[in-house]
Image (cartoon, grey):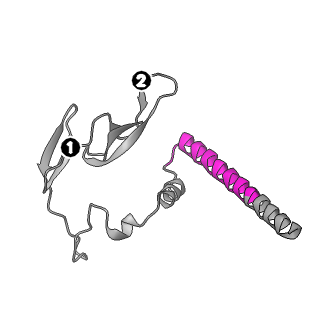
Amino acid sequence: MKTISQLDSNEYFVAATVADADPMQAGEFLLPAGAVDAKPPKTPDGKRSRWAGSKWTHEDMPEPELDDEQSEPVPDYPTEAMQNVSFEEILEALEKADLLSQEQKTRRKAANKAVAEFDRQMVRRSKRIEERKAARMAAK
């Protein structure tokens, strides 16, 4: 795995993310859509970072635009409510909006299957342990 940079549609830095190793080509990495193979920038306060093809540039943060009905701008950073959203909830929302690729959907189903099987194994193991404890108690 390798830390890379996720960009928005205008090439602005959004977040650090991870690229997985390519299982088909040694030394290569699989980049998520909209990501660049670059370390996350060190963005100065009051600035935002933009990818300029081969390096980061820093621009002043724009003033938020207000709609006629808005009294406060909508933040372009995670609010406390947004930070409490689980990764699973985000994936579910993306899947509902049909924004996941077929490969991502297949991987998600396989991961859910593996987690469910692990849970079943843990339940069986717990039952066996409880049965052994009960048998030892009955033998005393």
Q: Residue at x 81, y 61 (%)?
A: 132
Up/down of 106 relative to 92, above or below: above
Q: Which residues are magenta?
A: 100-125
Residue 127 placement, left or right of 32: right
Looking at the magenta stretch, what is its main secondary structure? Answer: helix
Residue 110 placement, left or right of 48: right
Task: Assess disc 2: are there few (<14), some (14-19) or many (≥20) residues with their C-alpha within 10 Å of its C-alpha.
Answer: few
Residue 17 placement, left or right of 71: right
Whether residue 131 is visible, yes or no, is yes
Q: Residue at x 60, y 47 (%)?
A: 111
Is the Cβ of the residue at disc 2 closer than 8 Å to that at disc 1?
Answer: no
Q: Image quarter for residue 73?
A: bottom left
Residue found at the very far front of the displayed protein: 140
The residue where tag 1 is placed is 50
Percent x, y for residue 83?
37, 64
As for residue 83 lying within the magenta part, the answer is no
Residue found at the very far right of the displayed protein: 139
Residue type at the position of mark 2: Gly
